[in-house]
Amino acid sequence: MYGDAATPYPVEMRGIKPLPGTGPSSPTSPIQMSRKSSVEITEGDLQVYPSPLHVHAVFLCHGLWGEPSHMYALRDALKSRADREDVAVSIHCCSSYRGKLSYDGVDVCADRVVDEVQHEVDQLKIVGKRVVRFSILGYSLGGLIARLAVFLLNSHSFFERIQPCNFTTIASPAIGLPLAPGFIPKKIRAISAFFLSRTGTHLFLTDKGQGSKIPLIQELSTPRYTRVLANFERVDIYANAILDRMVPYVAGGITTDDPFMEALATAGDEIHRVPTETSLTLDRLQLVFDERYPDLISTVETIPKDEMKSVPKSNLLSADRPKSTLIPCIAPLRPWFTPSTYPFLPRPLRPVLVGTIPLVIPAVLLVVVTFTIQGVKSRIRIKRHFRHRAGRTWKSRVWDDLEDHIQPPSRSWTAATTNSTSTGSTVVHVNTNDLYPTRKAGLGSNLSTAQHDMIDALNKSIPNMKKHVAFFPGVFTSHTVIVCQDQHNIVHRRGLAIVQHWADIFQL
């Protein structure tokens, strides 16, 4: 068993497809990396590989309540490209914190992923394959887990002989979950943190460390943790522009501005987009989409007020256009149980759905009881985990094994990041220079001072970071669509363009 998982990890070898006459016993191999292929030497029952086959190991981390199968679309897209280019790639969908195990906290799950990585590398070594390149992708909660995991691997000298290549997060709450100030949001934060056990306290920034007295996610934004990301050849951040009911744009895109929220609020309850359109006018925003990846925003520009009259009517979002060509879009902040929240349903069904709320109450109570039970079980697992890890030479929290003490956060450590690194990140698929400089409404105003500091620090300390923004109108939530969580679901399949984009820019 590994970590606290009940079953051994499945070892999934992907992308390794030697041509006939090649492989460990062949004098040359088309998938080697500038070295002669391994030669198998038999000494009794022992097989010795003096020159092992070089492999690029890729690890995919799912999100909260997730399963390895949620990463299969990403796995298959990368495998297909590796096969075409005859590159030896081992793609592993992490399973050590699947399902209810994801309640146990970012640090505990990161420990499990580190064990899983080391186990997979050892298994490849046994079969004569040497990992020389390493990449990791984290979706949703998995993005935070991946950030901590690479820090732990680096502190354990993992990258001394292995080249870090690609680091990717998709719809990941890099700064925790934003929540509006006030009494009710505060109670929601406390209740959610309770039901989600240790992971909930991390996501809502209510945990306190043993030494530095700051939340774990806030600590992940300090230079000590972000320095390892600068060593990767690529650092890519994917975020949903709209309708992500789990991770809003400001959290997934690591930005203080949310121009889409304000534009959607002005546009009205229902907005529409023709799928084949390469550009779209949303209030004062002009969105241009990638020709090859139609759900990926290429640029965003602001239309001056004096030019709004000159914008062709055909380019404006309007309910007057033919309904057969329209895809409705739900305003992100609409209440869940109002008819206008479900424009993709026929009008007669909307009040029917709302009228079933009394029938839903027992189901909600069942969910609450289930969450409570799982939270208790999670706390028991966490205690066992730390007892088991007591003798380790390295820990998941920096204050447990490092001599220097990190002081509570302030504007000074954000400024220090600017002096120690190069200038800010490069936004590839979003031209933010033309966006509104300030926001009076939307989630950007709900960010805490600590979250503003985290955004500044992450953008300044990771110079190789590139951001990509997806746009999925007409779905209930874009959070599951962006990674095509279920390839058999026609709605989820709309995310295949984003999945393919990641596979195409991946540094093999």
Image: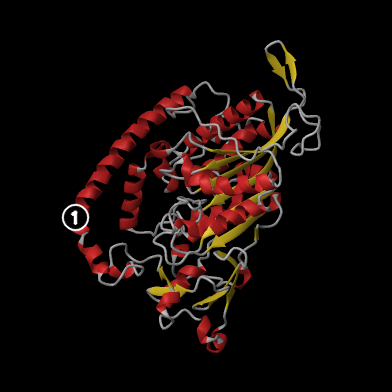
Residue 507 in picture, x, y percent from top left: 69, 48
What residue did someone put label 1 on? 359
- Asked which secondary structure carries label 1, the reply is helix
Q: Please say whether residue 349 is visible from this viewpoint.
A: yes
- On-image quarter of the C terminus: top right
Q: Nearer the viewer, residue 30 or 253?
A: 30
Q: Position of residue 36 (x, y in %)?
A: 81, 32
Which residue is more in the foreground, 222 or 168?
168
Q: Of all residues shown, which one is farthest toward the left?
A: 358
Left or right? Give the position of 22 relative to 414. Answer: right
Rendered location of residue 389, percent (x, y) = 49, 24
Residue at the spot 40% in from the left edge and 77% down from the top edge = 323
Q: Is residue 181 left or right of residue 230?
A: left
Q: Is residue 253 visible?
A: no
Please provide percent x and percent y for residue 161.
72, 32
Amino acid type, label 1: Leu
Q: Report the residue at 53% width, 49% height from top.
A: 73
